[in-house]
Amino acid sequence: MNADSRVPFKFKLGQRTDERIHSAIYAAIVTHQLRPATALQETALAEAFGVSRTIIRKVLQRLEHEKLVVILPNKGARVARPTTDEGRQVFEARHAIESELVRLVARKHDERGVQQLRSIVAEETKAQAANDKRRRVQLSGDFHSTLAELAGNSVLAGFVQELVSRTSLIIALYEVPGTVPCSCDEHTGIIDAIASSNEALAIERMSHHLKHVESQVDLSQSTGGVDFMSLFSSALGKRA
């Protein structure tokens, strides 16, 4: 693995081993280095991190709770593969929750929080200029997670963290080729509305931003069963 393909995360001083491993696998999933449905073998991961399978199992169970991993009996763990229905539900939930969060932040923001958000967008702008998609995806998620934390509601912040992570999987699966990523200006516009304590404008800009994100994926695809008889009837010389 070369330097450019490494997972973009940093260990925090004093983190427990399982926390560090969780951070690494989490980052690899949300930045699309581990694609949906990728098998996560306990033995291979234990060897990669130099720990026991017990620790890896604990981390995978936590990621399953966060909806990023599925663990199937006798088949092991895999990166989750959300359906199109789940995708639509995730975006519906984000619209509802993040509209309320941005209203709360606009109502009681402070300069330190505003500067924290602007710092993230500044790094996001650099990543976009460098065409560093993985870094940009990570920072975009950081923006929304930080915004949730600034609202001061830890329950809602937890929901947003999960929804942002699941959105990353949805984009990895259903992104429309050639779509233009959201401009950092959209995040800046949200911050400006917050800084001016304009709750209505902050909600409007958040809604516009989330609609833009949703427009980048095609959730009209069916993920149900396939009618093989109809699909291959012409090849077999039969009428559909």
Image (spheres, helix red, strand yellow):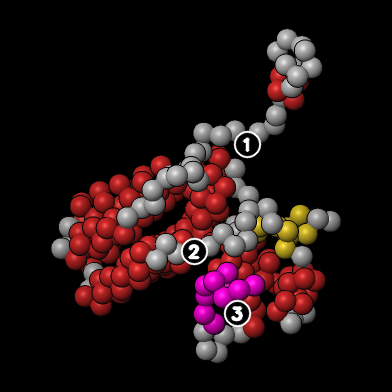
Q: Inspect the image, locate mark 3, and give the three-letter code of the amino acid beneath it.
A: Arg
Circle 2 Cα neighbour tier, 10 Å, few/some/many (<14 / 14–19 / ≥20): some
The answer to whether residue 157 is visible is no
Q: Residue at x 84, y 56 (%)?
A: 74
Q: Position of residue 3 (x, y in %)?
A: 57, 75
Q: Which residue is mark 1?
A: 223
Q: Quadrant of residue 14?
A: bottom right
Front residue (pair 140, 203): 140
The span from disc 2 to disc 3 (Cα, nearest Å) is 19 Å
Residue receiving disc 3: 20
Q: Give how far across and how far down residue 237 sits, in percent.
A: 77, 12
Q: Which residues are magenta?
A: 1-11
Quickly name the residue at label 2.
134
Up-down relation of residue 156 to residue 171 (above or below): below
Q: Residue at x 68, y 66 (%)?
A: 61
Tell me, yes or no, whether the two marked residues, 1 and 3, touch with CB atoms within 8 Å: no
Tag 1: amino acid: Thr
- Which quarter shows the N terminus? bottom right
User: Residue 138, image x and y in percent?
Assistant: 46, 65
Q: Secondary structure at mark 1?
A: loop
In whole angstroms, how far apart are the C-alphas of marks 1 and 3?
34 Å
Q: Nearer the viewer, mark 2 or mark 3?
A: 2
In-front residue for pair 116/238 = 238
| Residue 2, magenta (yes or no) | yes
As drawn, the residue found furthest toward the top would be 239
Inspect the image, locate mark 2, and give the three-letter code of the amino acid beneath it: Arg
Q: Is 55 left, or right, of 202 in this rendering?
A: right
